[in-house]
Image (tube, grey):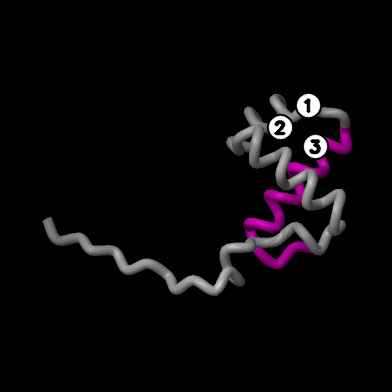
Amino acid sequence: MCCDVTASRQFQVIWLLARGHTISQVSATMAFGERWIEQLLARYNADGPDALRDLRRSNGATPPILNLSF
């Protein structure tokens, strides 16, 4: 169903919430912040399954270049 890890984890969050787990329980299980889970749930409720994807890939920003010189 999912083609990337990010979407898979997001679907798992929604699935756990649908099974009756609280946001706090899901946060502890999935190691996501409660506020982020609330935002994900709101996005899912507004746009359905299409809202669950890695939004960083399409934000128009260029990937950062790490400068490892000290």
Q: Are marks 1 and 2 in contact (CB under 8 Å)?
A: yes
Query: What amino acid is at disc 3?
Result: Leu
Q: Are marks 3 and 1 in contact (CB under 8 Å)?
A: no
Which labelled disc corresponds to residue 22? 1
Expressed as whole percent of the image width and height from the top left, the position of residue 36 reads: 65, 41
Query: What amino acid is at disc 2?
Result: Val
- Label 3 vs 1, first from the N-terminus: 3
- Alpha-carbon span between mark 1 and mark 2: 6 Å
Q: Are marks 3 and 2 in contact (CB under 8 Å)?
A: yes
Query: What amino acid is at disc 1?
Result: Thr
Q: Which segment is the magenta one?
A: 1-19
Crowding at mark 3 (Cα within 10 Å: few <14, some 14-19, many 20+):
some
Which labelled disc corresponds to residue 16? 3
Relative to 58, is 23 on the left or the right?
Answer: right
Vertical position of residue 17 compared to residue 63: above or below: above
Vertical position of residue 56 compared to residue 39: above or below: below
Vertical position of residue 27 compared to residue 39: above or below: above
- Label 3 vs 2, first from the N-terminus: 3
Residue at image coords 58%, 69%: 59
Q: Is residue 31 magenta?
A: no
Query: Is the N terminus in the top left, top right, bottom left or bottom right quadrant?
Result: bottom right
